[in-house]
Amino acid sequence: MDTPTALLDVTRMQRNIQRMQGRASTLGVQLRPHVKTHKCAEVVAAQIAAGATGITVSTLKEAEYFFAQGIRDILYAVAMAPHKLPQALALRREGCALTLITDSLAGSKAIVDFGRLHAETFAVMIEIDCDGHRSGVKPQDPRLLEIARLLGTSLAGVLTHAGESYGLDTPQALQAIAELERARCVAAAERIRAAGMPCAQVSVGSTPTALSAVSLEGVTELRAGVYAFFDLVMHNIGVCHLDELALSVLTTVIGHQPEKGWIITDAGWMAMSRDRGTQAQKRDFGYGQVCTETGEPIDGLLLSGANQEHGVAQFQGKKVDVVAQFPLGTRLRILPNHACATGTQFDSYSAVLENGDVQVWERLRGW
């Protein structure tokens, strides 16, 4: 096998998928996985087989790709840019049950006006800002009802994403933000209903909050994405163990700097990505945790530096004869900080099955 290669442990992936599906079932909601992490037909098939209802996408290219794979119920969870409405219309005209989102009066008007012009009623959800992390309308903002009225029969519901959960690392804090996510999205839906308008769907989710929520009363569906693979950021947050990370990068030792204790690999940031998401967390993994070829983490050995095609692996806090222990040609695996960012560096995964066989699973890229 050539290197660097994105390795996918299918057994771990299947366990992760079953775990999240079990959480959704226990909490009494539908699971609509976000496929932006893996962008892979085989992974989506495993999620649907486990019980997922529809999918969430981050690009219309993903929507087109997975609709062609037979997935009809698709939520495009990025605020709709007006120039993309013809692409969305084409999908709906082909039979895709595509749902859009908006968080502004201007965006809503663009959708409604375009739909009226083309005799199409789009399904639209209003994005709610539950934690000040990114975009959305606050539940008590007067614009919420104005947007709902403007959407009229296009209004499908409300959704939110507690992105601030990525900065937490205790069960108590994660449970609290999961409840905040739920309560504020439900409050937005109830406010719309109290104004005499229907609001059927209440959609919440992130991997940390989905795995931490105690109750999802008033919620209809759960969204989460990175759970299928997990990564070091999720490990630091506390929602997974290292032996649950399904994605790694297989790399080869191509050189050394013995006096510095450096092991040079052929996996630089073009393989791992530049994501340093663990840098702000309680444990910084550099560009990734280095493991043996069979996947066991090597204590203290991190990918501490990365150039475009060269990685620098180095032990933290101890001196090791790196030439003797990791001779030229040694194969290693590196666990990534952010599975979404590392995955997108590759056109395909080398999917390792339980029996050891390897299959090539293609991965969608681009917009």
Image (spheres, rainbow, N blue to C red):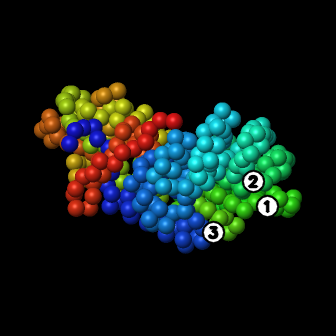
Using the image, determine if residue 241 lies above or below residue 6. Answer: below
The residue positioned 70% from the left and 67% from the top of the image is 218
The amino acid beneath tag 1 is Pro
Task: Indicate which disc, 1 or 2, sits on the residue closer to the N terminus.
Answer: 2
User: Which SS class for mark 2?
Assistant: strand
- The quadrant holding residue 303 is top left
Going 47% across and 41% down the picture, which residue do you hit?
A: 277
**Mark 1 crowd level (few <14, some 14–19, many ≥20, 10 Å Cα):** some
For the residue marked with disc 3, what is the amino acid?
Answer: Ser
Cα separation, mark 1 vs mark 3, equals 23 Å
Q: Residue at x 47, y 62 (%)?
A: 48
Left or right position of 32 against 339: right
Q: Which residue is mark 1?
A: 198
Q: Residue 215 got which mark?
A: 3
Within 10 angstroms of label 2, few (less than 14), some, or many (20 or more) residues? many
Q: Amino acid at mark 2?
A: Leu
